[in-house]
Amino acid sequence: MTENPETERILALFGQAEVVRARELSAQGVHPMTLQRLVEKGIVEREGRGLYRLAGTEVSEHYSLLQAAKRVPQGVICLLSALRFHQLTTQKPFEVWLMLERGSRRPAVDTPPLRIHYLSGEAFRAGIEEHLQEGVTLRVYNPAKTVADCFKFRNKVGKDVALEALRETLRHKRATVDDIWRYAEFCRVARVIYPYLEALD
């Protein structure tokens, strides 16, 4: 393509992560005009405000999650998106479901479409896992916490989805009844979830 050292540095960064933020490139000393020239040449594609990827590369199954993680690094993938990530639902959400700590400002993000929810304190912090996908760290609630969240937000996700999540999590042994009960207490839905846990245990 070109032997320009700055261009080579950009391409090396894209080799490490499927999607890259403009500010990450800038921090590596890449001039915005160089990035713009690569876009004009069709080497790099703009994926929304401040997000770029190499043109012609196949996007992974979790590409929208990678975008969300880059745009809103303080968020945690939750509810339907977390269930999908853990392969515990038949749902295919077109939005990325993201949890923010209560009091956080709603992010102004054009891509990907987001469904934002809020929790506070231990209910927000508990159960966060980090998964490295295509060079990007995804913060995702673990299966047990996701089940508890689905019952807490059952009016948003649907009671049938919460029950499916509970059944699938236990059936695939992704969490124990005790795990789910602990997070249900954090989320203050222990009374709601108790009869279903008792029936399935």
Image (cartoon, rainbow, N blue to C red):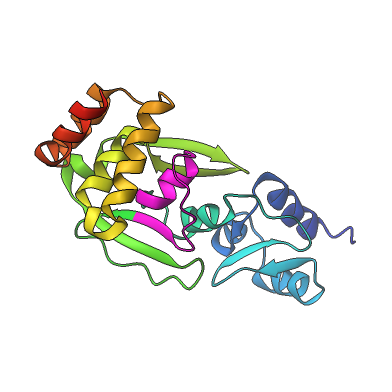
- Left-right relation of 108 to 157: right
Residue at the bottom extreme of this rendering: 40
Q: Position of residue 71 (x, y in %)?
A: 47, 60
Judging depth in this view, the residue of 74 and 164 nearest the camera is 164
Residue at the left extreme of this rendering: 191
Q: Position of residue 3 (x, y in %)?
A: 89, 57
Judging depth in this view, the residue of 92 and 163 nearest the camera is 163
For the point 18% across and 27% down, the residue is 198
Judging depth in this view, the residue of 129 and 168 nearest the camera is 168
Residue at the front extreme of this rendering: 199
Q: Is residue 152 above or below residue 30?
A: above
Q: Is residue 162 above or below residue 194?
A: below
Q: Quadrant of residue 35?
A: bottom right
Tag count = 0
For the point 64% across and 48% down, the residue is 17
Magenta stretch encompasses residue 132 = no
Q: Position of residue 177 (x, y in %)?
A: 25, 24
Image quarter of the C terminus: top left
State which region is magenta: 78-98
Image quarter of the N terminus: bottom right
For the point 44% across and 44% down, the residue is 89
- Left-right relation of 33 to 104: right
Q: Quadrant of residue 100?
A: bottom left
For the point 46% across and 68% down, the residue is 113
- Left-right relation of 6 to 32: right
Q: Is residue 186 above or below residue 3?
A: above
Q: Position of residue 155 (x, y in %)?
A: 22, 58
- Left-right relation of 122 to 100: left
